[in-house]
Image: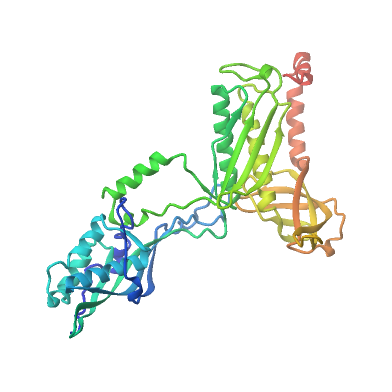
Amino acid sequence: MSAGAGMSMISQGSWRSTAVALAVGMQLVTLAGCDKLNHHSEEVTVSAIVPAPASGSTSQSDSSAPATNIGTVTHVHVRAEGIGASPDEALSQALRQAIMQVNGTTLDLASSQFRAALTVSTGRSMVDLQSSGFAELVQQESRGAISDFRVTELRRESSSDSSIHAVIEANVAKFKGPDSEGRPRIIVAPIRISGNVTPALNREATLVRQRITDALTQSGRFIVLEHGATPEIDAELERIANGQASPDQFSKLGQGVGADLVWVGRLNALSPTNALDEGSAVRGRGEWSISQQLVNVTTSEVLLSDTTPVDQNSKLADGRTSSIENSIASKVVSSILVQLFPVSIASRDGINVVLSQGGQSVKVGASYQVVSLGKAIKDPQTGRMLGRTEQECCTVVVDRVAQTLSYGHLENMKISPDELVDGNLELRQQVASVAPPDNQRQSAGTQRKGKSTHRGKDSAASERDDDW
């Protein structure tokens, strides 16, 4: 018997506001008999969740920064088949196939949208199941999870077989997460503290973790995951699951991703005589260091492990600890980037260069060693790649830092600019801080001169006092 064409009750415009409930609960159903069925799918519609920024709007740090992508809702056209002892059972099986073909091999049938769509055929005749009214009912009951539904075939297998064979076509909504663009997903674990733990040190560890998270996020090289806000995230997902949010939000459920890397740090704080107690003032000089490990979640391989001293001569007075936090974060992120994504010179025009990273990966006014990469070297005994040869080239002075790029110029050239090959220049350790431009030095000198007329002996002596 030929199938009647189903009339859609949902326009293409409303698809963007009625996405599918993917997984709401714990009851999972695995489909049996998949080897008997043939499936065809085609992605036909994409609706963006995040609109393009308004004309003229700019990022705080870089007007050319890419727009944030938090995912899209796609509608996939599928053709699915089902076999059952009755027409309604065969059609219900075909609906299961269509939904699971798009959203995976497991499906939560406790979801009200899918439960209604899968049970709406119960007790109906073959004529009813092929009517346009039934197609409209499926779309209504699924609240947009299924659209453009129609039964293309509904027949008995053979005269000797009482089984019913159903074939349907429909558009099934699916949430498509943002493209990682090759960036690894990383979690910054809460920092542990060795030594005498005080509330002040706990706060300091929390601030250091936040600075590291800031720097990794701003580098643009990682997708930083946050598991510390789990209660708030779970509460929001529960609101969506309970139907307290608009229907298009259901497609966001079950879309959590796991981490590729975990950063684990230990703050080796102060010696006992220099401990920073609650409400204390300066008790001498602090001896800080950070021990870190970067671990591959899949293999548990330690990719990076070291202990770095940080500002051992810095005083720990109120208002001064922020520099220590930034110093720790800078050293941590720098070591991670050097290990995984060394900063390179992406573009060069004479001595003016564009660096491949921005954010907190480099600092304005700082000078970094630049090396020119040569041929790759292999271990003659194991055949393992040892790396590429390096020739000291010059230094680069960072003039401006944007969100994903930095700008600077080359100095102290040890290789002719004509011999430099774009793409083979990488930054290494920071070598020095450069003096500000002449106009800034003149301005600063004028200010210092003005202040010196009001400065007495006590003030001058205080500047020579290291503990001032």
Say above or below: 107 vs 154: above
Spot occupied by residue 232 in the image (x, y as percentages of width and height):
39, 40
Q: How is the image coloured?
A: rainbow
Camera-side residue of 254 and 413: 254
What residue is at 20 percent from the left and 77 percent from the top?
163
What residue is at 56 percent from the left and 55 percent from the top?
65
Position of the C terminus by quadrant: top right
Position of the N terminus by quadrant: bottom left
Camera-side residue of 352 and 95: 95
Say above or below: 190 vs 360: above
Extreme residue toward the front, this view: 160
Q: Is residue 253 left or right of residue 178?
A: left
Spot occupied by residue 250 in the image (x, y as percentages of width and height):
32, 55
Spot occupied by residue 147 in the image (x, y as percentages of width and height):
27, 68
Q: Is residue 383 left or right of residue 226?
A: right
Q: Quadrant of residue 111?
A: bottom left
Q: Quadrant of residue 184?
A: bottom right
| Number of on-image labels | 0
Q: Is residue 157 left or right of residue 440?
A: left
Spot occupied by residue 282 in the image (x, y as percentages of width and height):
66, 17
What residue is at 64 percent from the left and 19 percent from the top?
275
